[in-house]
Amino acid sequence: MAATPENGAHPQEHVDVLIVGAGLSGIGAACHLRREQPHKSFAILEARDSIGGTWDLFRYPGIRSDSDMFTLGYSFRPWREAKSIAEGHSILAYVKETARDHGVEQSIRYGHRVIGAQWSTAEARWTVQAQRDDTGETVQMTCDFLYACTGYYRYDEGYTPHFEGSEQFGGPIVHPQHWPEDLDWSDKRVVVIGSGATAVTLVPALAERAAHVTMLQRSPTYILSLPARDPIANALRARLPMELAYSLVRWKNVLLTMLNFQLCRRAPRRMNRLIRRLVAKQLPDGYDVDTHFNPTYSPWDQRLCLVPDGDLFKALSDGSASVSTGRIERFTASGIELESGEHLDADVIVTATGLNLLLLGGIELSVDGRRIDSGSTVAYKGMMLCGVPNMALTLGYTNASWTLKADLVAQYVCRLLAHMDAQGASICTPQAPHPALARDPIIDLQSGYVLRSVEKLPKQGPSAPWRLHQNYVKDVRLLRRGPIDDAMAFSNPPRAQAGPGGGADSGAGQDRIAVPV
């Protein structure tokens, strides 16, 4: 339905729920709405010109999941491929097929980059501005509920630190986030700077064609090898109905991941030694494991990297790749000089140096004319911002698959919308904890991309519902079965007559329906 146009202006389109982002999270959110709230109208605004988010954006060689697909997949759609650690093109196909089969493709507006959203309490709705890529014009929509599925990093720009002398290097310098389609590294010497998930993926993939690949790291990262194909999953799928096998393997992998995380937190030295032994078994005798694969931090202070079938270690063992650990002094015309004096010859340099965080895709939020600074807010159940009405955002787990949390958030949003309908409420506003209570960063990893932007991220409180558990079992209880009205205020102000987005700035005279606990 649309608002009545005034003075000949184009009418504003209105939907019950407006989803921002058509990636893994956004498509999942739309499917949950279609399944659980079929009477709600919704649209999806996607800044890019295609579906898939991360899995369409990243095109570098070897791109794959760093989580198993039984947990990275949707709860309502079994993963049917043979590989548990899947290539990027398979994941993209899975997302596209899910969108098509659940009838959400036609709800996507491509090339619509959301730049601002203003909440009006008097109107009980959001007015959202999006810039169209094809025409450059700014269009507006209104919605009752805003659902941000934008991830938390910048799609248009990866992180590359300043490297002295980089302008002198004679070959291409490439960031994986923007991999050139025409880049040819065949029979060339390649240096990959970095030791995270992207680097450990790139090195064995590039080594298949390159003369040699060197992974240059400032310090080591924890790396675990897992089978690309899950033998238990494939055995169960051969004997049980697909949906039952998928659910069993999903829970098996959830519990194993949680066990690994808890052991790393509670016995970090023991887990350090165990991971070191596992790595040493996959490398040649005498390999300098302590220099290249023994981090100085505890396991899960940063995210662990997974390599399927030990492909990285195989490349290191057969000599097609190597690891160099040290600090960069400067780039030269023919490669990279380290502070140690060692020179790494290179024809191509790949800067797998990380991401730039960007919460909400850079959308500027305001509530009744007051600009919202996300860094000064407190997260509610890890999915809403205290003091910001009728809005949810998807932030996946840092210690497990992103989609596990995305699914729970979508289910909670559907429960919340149903509760509001049952109560006759048009506004839900998470309430902040007492100002005297402690505030911590919402992401507790020590990774560089987090530390560079931690002040821009919402905070978390000392206990539920303001504490982010990073624990799927606890979140199942909290989000799927827990109360809806804990520390949540519901209200139903009379709507002004001016139409969408034209309300007052205070919300005085609200008819309060529920009081936060």
Image (spheres, rainbow, N blue to C red):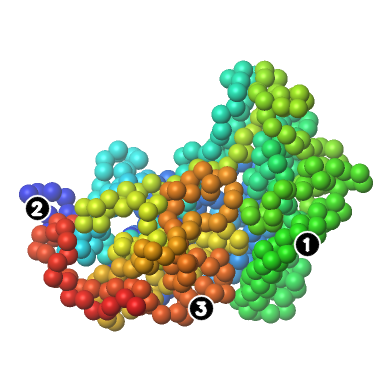
SS at badge 2: loop
SS at badge 1: helix
Residue at 67% across, 29% down: 328
Residue at 65% across, 19% down: 170
The amino acid beneath tag 1 is: Arg
Residue at 30% across, 68% down: 429
The amino acid beneath tag 2 is: Glu
Please state which of residues 331 and 348 is positioned toward the viewer in this rendering. 331
Say whether residue 19 is left or right of residue 172. left
Estimate the x, y position of residue 368 in percent, counting from the top left.
21, 57
Q: Quadrant of residue 38?
A: bottom left
The quadrant of the picture occupied by the N terminus is bottom left
Label 3 vs 2, first from the N-terminus? 2
The extreme left residue here reads: 7
Q: Nearer the viewer, mark 3 or mark 1?
A: 1
Real-space Cα separation, disc 3 to disc 2, in angstroms: 48 Å
**In the rendered image, the vertical position of residue 45 relative to residue 32, given as above or below:** above
Residue tagged 3: 477
The extreme front residue here reads: 436
Say whether residue 313 is left or right of residue 50. right
Estimate the x, y position of residue 250 in percent, counting from the top left.
63, 71
Q: Quadrant of residue 43?
A: bottom left
The extreme right residue here reads: 285
Q: Nearer the viewer, mark 1 or mark 2?
A: 1
Estimate the x, y position of residue 224 in percent, counting from the top left.
74, 55
Residue tagged 2: 6
Label 1 Cα crowd, 10 Å radius (few <14 / some 14-19 / many 20+): few
| Residue 181 can be seen, yes or no | no
Label 3 vs 1, first from the N-terminus? 1
Real-space Cα separation, disc 1 to disc 2, in angstroms: 69 Å
Residue tagged 1: 270
